[in-house]
Amino acid sequence: MHPTDKAARVAGAVYLSMVVTAPFSLIYIPSTLIVRGNATATANNILAHETLFRLGIVADLITSIIFICVVLALYRLLSGVNKTLASLMVALVLVSTAVGFMNVLNNIAALTLFRGSDF
Amino acid sequence: MSSTHNPGRVAGFLYLLLVVLAPVRLIYIPSALYVRGNATATANNIATHELLFRLGMVSDLLCGTIVIFLTLAFYRLFKAVDQNLAVLVVILGGLLPAAIDFLNVLNDAAALMLVRGADFLSVFDKPQRDALAMLFLRLHHQEIVAAEILWGLWLFPLAILAYRSRFLPRFLGVWLIINGFAYLIMSFTGLLLPQYEDMVSNIVFPALLGEMAFMLWLVIKGAKPQPLDASASLSAVG
């Protein structure tokens, strides 16, 4: 296989794996657990399916990690075309993954409040 | 041999700085100030030892800065071994953990504001403020649990680089891989099965000494990438 071809396939395969994990936390979890405009029902759903909710948090983090691998694979594929644009692509994804890592805190905060631990 | 001519030792000293500073906020502050399950006692401790708590925040920020320079030092040390892996070390071990450290300080700052109870916070009663402060401290810890994924992952490219480098002993690379898995296990237990978090971190603790061993090796022995012609003549002799 031509090296460019191989780089393209690697990038495509990694990208594909993200298509599995991302919708789990972005679409599946909200659609099953969140009841629009009803905080109590949402809280009860999340408490009843706490493991599912926690899996969503983990899926978010894994998506961020895969996203880094995707963009590095794309960089290898495309840096020959225009190095500056390729670097910009990597930088923007890195910022977005850092945001992704911090954003799970919102879910964790919600879970902590729903559980209403001792304090 | 001066350290400026030994990129391994530069990385080692930065690593040493990190190993000294990181436990301030990670271990010392929680053990000195937190009272488990008691928001009022924790808040009172923080109010009494505000300077200590602020030092914890500063140490978090310093660590966030050190990891950038540390991973850049590793990049310089290892880029001849495999540049792609060296870039991965900088991204997973330096840039992302640094961004997280810098944002995570906000949780501590929020907790401290609530503990101090500035006038605009007087709409909340003291017990409510204490509970909210406890929530932010808990979130600080949870973000660390999430970041442990990165603390583990960056060790994989680092370990492979050390293993392949031929200027560092291979057992250090193996130990770093184990160390990386230990962080991943700790993180996933904390996220999915928090009731086992303490138990698991006690079990995997010996694995975490891999970074310590690696750091000490770099400080004491240093590491110098062999110039290409030297390694070629060596292999010709061998």
Image (cartoon, coloured by chain):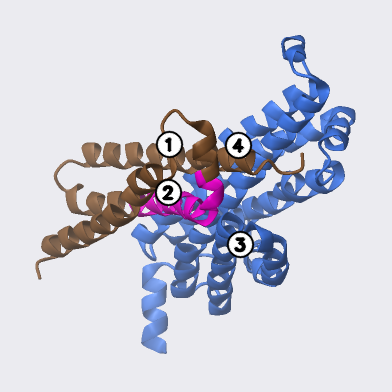
Q: Are marks 2 and 4 in contact (CB under 8 Å)?
A: no
Colour chosen for chain B? blue
Q: Is residue A66 magenta?
A: yes
**Which mark, by number, is residue B104?**
4
Helix, strand, or loop for circle 1?
Answer: loop
Distance from Cα at disc 1 to Cα at disc 4 = 30 Å
In the rendered image of the structure, the colour used to display chain A is: brown
Q: Residue A115 versus residue B235: which sits nearer the camera? A: A115
Indicate which disc residue A60 carries.
2
- The Cα atoms of the two marked residues, 4 and 3, are separated by 19 Å
The residue segment tinted magenta is A45-68
Quadrant (top left/top right/bottom left/bottom right) for the C terminus of chain B:
bottom left
- State the predominant SS element of the stretch in magenta: helix
Using the image, name the chain to which the residue with label 4 belongs.
B
Give the chain of mark 3: B
- Label 2 CA crowd tier, 10 Å (few <14, some 14–19, many 20+): many
Q: CA distance from mark 1 to mark 2?
A: 20 Å
Q: Nearer the viewer, mark 1 or mark 3?
A: 1
Q: Residue at x 30, y 54 (%)?
A: A18
Q: Which mark is residue B186?
A: 3
**In which quadrant of the rendered image does the N terminus of chain B lie?**
bottom right
Judging from the image, mark 1 belongs to the subunit labelled A
> Does the segment drawn in magenta span residue B83?
no
Mark closer to the observer (2, 4):
2
